[in-house]
Image (cartoon, rainbow, N blue to C red):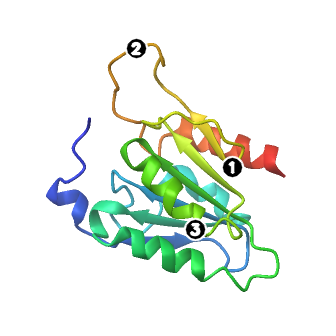
Amino acid sequence: MREFDEPSRAAGPGVVADGPVGNPTVLVIDPAGEALHDAIPATWRDLTDRLRIVWLRVPAAPGWQSTVDAVLTRHRDDVQPVLDVVTSGPIAADVVDLVRRHESLVRSVLLVDPEVDVDDDFVRVVVRSHDAADDRIPPPLPLGHPDVVFGVVEELNRLG
């Protein structure tokens, strides 16, 4: 598994956001800590004309679980909360458990290279970059990878 506790990944903001407030929100919970420079990764920026992207950088947010609770709770009074959560690899199971406490606010959880089996309509695997029959678990694709963005957009379009 890739090491996510590098000091450079812990530097910078814990949460960055882009896109109009009030638009449907995608909460990205990133175990690798991309978005070091107070901006979401460039591969996601084209989506901000129609989505609000909130990027939580786990290495820079030691209490990331409470931050997720706070972000999700902010949407509880939305007239039509449309919130999708994206995460990957080693924290996928923790995120699914955490988001289930806010299931009325979240439309879906989208996983990239999860290290858990998924058999759930609420939780969808949008990218699996390795062969499931292979015993070795390679590091998950970075959430800023173009294939991840494509898989997320494809699933969001499918969800309507």
134 shown above or below 93: above
* SS label for mark 1: loop
Image quadrant in which the N terminus is located: top left
Q: Which residue is mark 2?
A: 134
160 shown above or below 99: above
**Circles 3 and 1: CB atoms closer than 8 Å:** no
Q: Is residue 119 left or right of residue 130?
A: right
Mark 2 residue type: Asp
The mark that comes first in sequence, 1 or 2, is 1
Q: Residues within 10 Å of mark 2 (few under 14, many from 20)?
A: few
Q: Position of residue 85 (x, y in %)?
A: 59, 58
Q: Residue at x 41, y 55 (%)?
A: 30
The mark that comes first in sequence, 2 or 3, is 3
Q: Residue at x 59, y 61 (%)?
A: 100
In front: label 2 or label 3: 3
Mark 1 residue type: Phe
Q: Give the residue at the far left of this rendering.
A: 7
* SS label for mark 3: loop
Q: Which residue is mark 3?
A: 101
The alpha-carbon separation of the residues under discs 1 and 2 comes to: 26 Å
Mark 3 residue type: Arg
Q: Is residue 49 left or right of residue 65?
A: right
Q: Residue at x 36, y 53 (%)?
A: 31
Q: Position of residue 88 (x, y in %)?
A: 45, 45
Q: Which residue is mark 1?
A: 122
* SS label for mark 2: loop
